[in-house]
Image (spheres, rainbow, N blue to C red):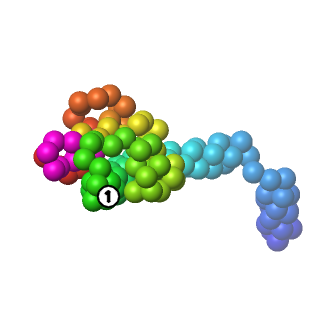
Amino acid sequence: MQVTSSKRRRGYARRRARGFNLIEIVVAIAIIAMLSAAVTVGVVKIKKKNDIDLTRTNAQSLRSAVKVWWALGNRDCPTVPELIAEGALDKSKSTKADAWDQPWVIKCEGDDATVVSRGPDKLAETDDDILVPND
């Protein structure tokens, strides 16, 4: 009887030494694919929120630059290139366009300025537009 159980162990060990079978590999790949899909969905949501937050912050900086422009004695409603040329705004990429590479819109009424980004859909006057200050 001992010879038989010893042979069984050696046969099992030989089978396991050959590697993984196809089913084990497919299951492992399926698990990895599901995990990567879940991570991707989470990352996309976080990126969208971060783009909105970054755009809102940059719009606030742009609005402050408009107020600096006015403090320098200019009374008209400036464009982004004018703010950069006058030194009221930094030349960085974030000040030239929003997170979706769309140009900023600066609207001036009286002594107040509103900075508008078209938002993720890149269309003007839709629900996802970002306005600073918020109306």
Q: Which residue is mark 1?
A: 72
Residue 109, magenta (yes or no): yes
Residue 94 x, y percent position in the rendering: 46, 50
Say which element carries label 1: loop
Q: Residue at x 40, y 57 (%)?
A: 88
Q: Is residue 21 in view from this perspective?
A: yes
Q: Quadrant of residue 12?
A: bottom right
Q: Name the residue type under label 1.
A: Leu
Residue 27 x, y percent position in the rendering: 60, 46
Q: Residue at x 46, y 38 (%)?
A: 101
Q: Residue furthest front?
A: 73
Instruction: Quarter of the image for the N terminus: give it.
Output: bottom right
Q: Which residues are magenta?
A: 108-116
Classified by dominant secondary structure, the portion drawn in magenta counts as strand
Q: Residues within 10 Å of mark 1 (few under 14, many from 20)?
A: few
Q: Residue at x 16, y 42 (%)?
A: 109
Q: Residue furthest bottom?
A: 2
| Rendered position, 129 above or below 3 | above
